[in-house]
Image: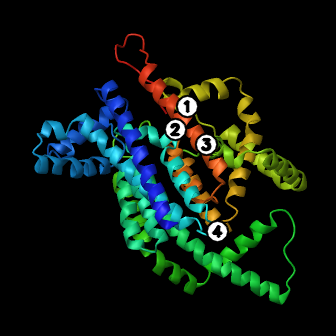
Amino acid sequence: MAQLEGYYFSAALSCIFLVSCLLFSAFSRALREPYMDEVFHLPQAQRYCEGRFSVSQWDPMITTLPGLYLVSVGVVKPASWILGWSEHVVCSIGMLRFVNLLFSVGNFYLLYLLFRKVQPRNKASSSIQRILSTLTLAVFPTLYFFNFLYYTEPGSVFFTLFAYLMCLYGNHRTSALLGFCGFMFRQTNIIWAAFCAGHIVAQKLSEAWKTELHKKKEERLPPIKGPFSELRRVLQFLLVYSMSFKNLSVLFLLTWPYVLLVLAFVVFVVVNGGIVVGDRSSHEACLHFPQLFYFFLFTAFFSFPHLLSPTKVKTFLSLIWKRRVQFSVIMLVSMVFVWKFTYVHKYLLADNRHYTFYVWKRVFQRHEIVKYLLVPAYMFAGWAIADSLKSKSIFWNLMFFVCLVASTVPQKLLEFRYFILPYIIYRLNIPLPPISRLVCELGCYTVVNFLTFYIFLNKTFQWPNNQDIQRFMW
């Protein structure tokens, strides 16, 4: 069976790489010049490729650290030495974009290894499920699109997934080092490096929690009752656990590489005067709580074969009726968040090249009341996501939720790219769905990708008083 799974994996990787190469060729023919953010990324990478690394050569409009450019130089420069290619060729737009195609191959392999590690291997059909799950996430539309442009997303995902994999294998020093590499691609990836530490902490807390429950069962202590009783029990346990120096020292000894990484990040923020490098005017942090709700709907849309069904809707409505008080409080708080903490970035209203522009214009701007009418949908999507993760411990879910909030809420701009990593982490950790649902999910992703690429390559337009060709994209 293992040998057969190897054949499946090789076939899937070969097919997706062949299709990606064909798409890369189509992109290269259509896009001879840098497009969108490539206008900043490509010239900076070319300066590094030419050996101009001084601070004076840095484009102040770039807001991320130079991880992408350094890795690109490390990949393309040896080609000029080994193959004798000229600097003009190895530093060309096509060669630099090809680096992200190589990252996509690495991401496919990492996703497969993560599914093998995260998901239990106790069924004969699980090998096909793992391959289909890997293939599906590898062509996840929001990520797959950027494999063909010179953006930070593929490399950012690669190093973050690699760090997560090393964490699962217990190699925490390597994981922290890879987390630093991910941070060099996007500063917010520090959150997912911290998630690796949170994974370790959640394991230790789960062990202690099971011991505590067993002890209470033997002592026959009466359970705490009332609204949010489970939450109160967990918070009480966490308070007691954190008061023990022995427990904290054990956790520190396990997570010290991540602690050092986070401390280095804090030093960077203090010295830099903020998390953003370069132009900060359009990247101001705020408490944008509805971003969490947008992520819930985003996840429900792309994981609808696993999250949406008549049975789930019926279960949700039944649960609302049984826990009316809790859901009333949650709905009221959600309404307040939507009312007081909804921010609209100037780019969201002005840049009609992004799909988010049309989502906002045709849904949220249709009427002021729409954003409130969507709160029940947010609640259902959030509950469905939590329900799909019930196989994970309550502490793992808590760590994931904290990291999800930290990675989404401070972002003022509604940008689907910000949801890529939390979505992938989520999707990796739900139980392997049946093959029929995976095929449905893969089919839907294929259709979305086909439409996205077709529109991007063929449905071009121009702005008034501007001769540049504009294209629609994520």
Identify residue type, mark 2.
Answer: Glu
Distance between the Cα atoms at labels 3 and 4? 25 Å
* Residue lying furthest right: 321
Residue 236: where, in percent of width, then height? 72, 74
**Image quadrant assignment for residue 267:** bottom left
Q: Earlier in the sequence, mark 4 or mark 2?
A: 4
Residue 288: where, in percent of width, then height? 59, 43
Q: Earlier in the sequence, mark 1 or mark 3?
A: 3
Residue linked to disc 1 = 356
Residue linked to disc 3 = 302
Q: Earlier in the sequence, mark 1 or mark 4?
A: 1
Distance between the Cα atoms at labels 3 and 2? 15 Å
Tell me what residue is drawn at x 51 percent, y 53 percent. 134
- In the rendered structure, the answer to whether residue 373 lies left or right of residue 447 reads right
As rendered, which of 288 and 151 lies closer to the eye?
151
As rendered, which of 120 and 185 lies closer to the eye?
120
Residue linked to disc 4 = 395
Residue linked to disc 2 = 415
Distance between the Cα atoms at labels 4 and 2? 28 Å
